[in-house]
Image: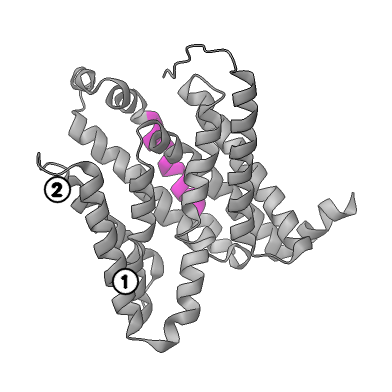
Amino acid sequence: MEWLVDPFEVSFVRHALAGGILVSLICALAGTWVVLRGMAFLGDAMSHGLLPGVAIAALLGGGLAVGAALSAAAMALGVTVLGRSPRLSPDTSIGLLFAGMLALGVIIVSHSRSFAVDLTGLLFGDVLAVRPEELTHLAVALAVAAAVSVLGHRSFVALTFDPRTAHTLGLGPRSAHALLLGLVTLAVVASFHVVGTLLVFGLLIAPAATMLLWARRIPSIMLGAAVLGVASTVIGLILSWHLGTAAGATITAVAVSLFFLGATAASLRDRLPRTRAVTG
C-alpha cells in the first residue's frame, strides 16, 4: 500500500491535497445550485470570463486574484443587466458576454509574447504549486461560501423551485439570484488558481451532478458532492504522481469519470420508471 502513501510524503503534494479539498468543498456548495438551476453554461462562462482581468493584472504586475475578482464581477453584472431584457434569453446574454470576455482576454494576451507560460497556468492551473498562504485564502473563501449557503438556503430553494414564494421570505427573486451569482463567482475566483479556469468547471459541475442522481435532499447533494470532490482530489493526485500526468487535469478527469460511473449505476437502478424529487 506504499504507492497510496508515497505521493503525500512530499510537502507540495500535501499542499495540493489541502488546496484540492478546500476547492472541492467550495465547489460543492456553489455547484449544487448551479446544477439544480440549470446554470452550467453560466458557470462555464464565469470561469472563462476571468481571463481579461487576470491578463491585465499579470501584465501590470498586480495580484491575479484581484484581477480575476474584478473580471468576474463585471461578468456577473453584465449577466444581471442583460438578463432583465425581455427580448434576450438568458443563454443568449451569457453567450454574448462569454464570447466577448474571452475575445478581450485573448487580445490582451496576444500583446505579450512572454505571457504564454502564465496563460497555460491560468487555463489549466497548477495545483502542485499551491502555497500555504493560498490555503488560508481558500479557507476564508470556504467560510464565506458556507455562510452565504446557510443564510440564503431558504431563498435559494424558493428561487429554484418557486420564485414567487421568494417574496414571502423577505428576499426578492432578483436579490436571491444576485446572491447566488455571487456565490458562484466566489467559487470560480477562489478556485481558478488551483485547478485553472478550464478545469474548475469540472469540479463545479461533476460531483453535484453525480449526487443529483442519487440524493433527494439538497443538503445530501451538497454533502455527497463534497465527498466526491475530495475523493477525486485524492485519487487524482495519486494517479498523477504515478502516471506523470497533469495534476489538475487528472483530478477533474476523475471527477467526470465518477459522474459517468454514477450515471451508469443510476440507470441500472432506475430501469423501472419512478418519480423522484429534489427537496430542500
Q: Nearer the viewer, residue 53 or 102?
A: 102
Q: Which residue is mark 2?
A: 81
Query: Of helix, strand and loop, which one carries label 2?
Result: helix
Q: Nearer the viewer, residue 206 or 129?
A: 206
The secondary structure that dominates the magenta segment is: helix
For badge 2, the amino acid type reads Val
Q: Residue at x 44, y 49 (%)?
A: 141
For badge 1, the amino acid type reads Gly
Q: Position of residue 148 (x, y in %)?
A: 37, 36
Task: State which quadrant residue 35 falls in.
Answer: top left
Q: Residue at x 50, y 19 (%)?
A: 216
Crowding at label 2, few (<14), some or many (≥20) Cα neighbours within 10 Å? few
Residue 7 relative to residue 262: left or right: right
Q: Is residue 147 magenta?
A: yes
Q: Position of residue 168 (x, y in %)?
A: 20, 17
Residue 160 relative to residue 235: left or right: left
Q: Position of residue 200 (x, y in %)?
A: 48, 53
Number of marks drawn: 2
Q: Is residue 81 visible?
A: yes
Q: Residue at x 33, y 47 (%)?
A: 42
Q: Residue at x 46, y 51 (%)?
A: 201
Task: State which quadrant residue 264 falls in.
Answer: top right
Residue 105: which numbered mark, if any? 1
Q: Nearer the viewer, residue 254 or 144?
A: 254
Q: Is residue 259 above or below residue 12?
A: above
Q: How is the image coloured?
A: one colour
Query: Of helix, strand and loop, which one carries label 1?
Result: helix
Q: Is residue 70 visible?
A: no
Magenta span: 138-150
Mark 2 or mark 1, earlier in chain = 2
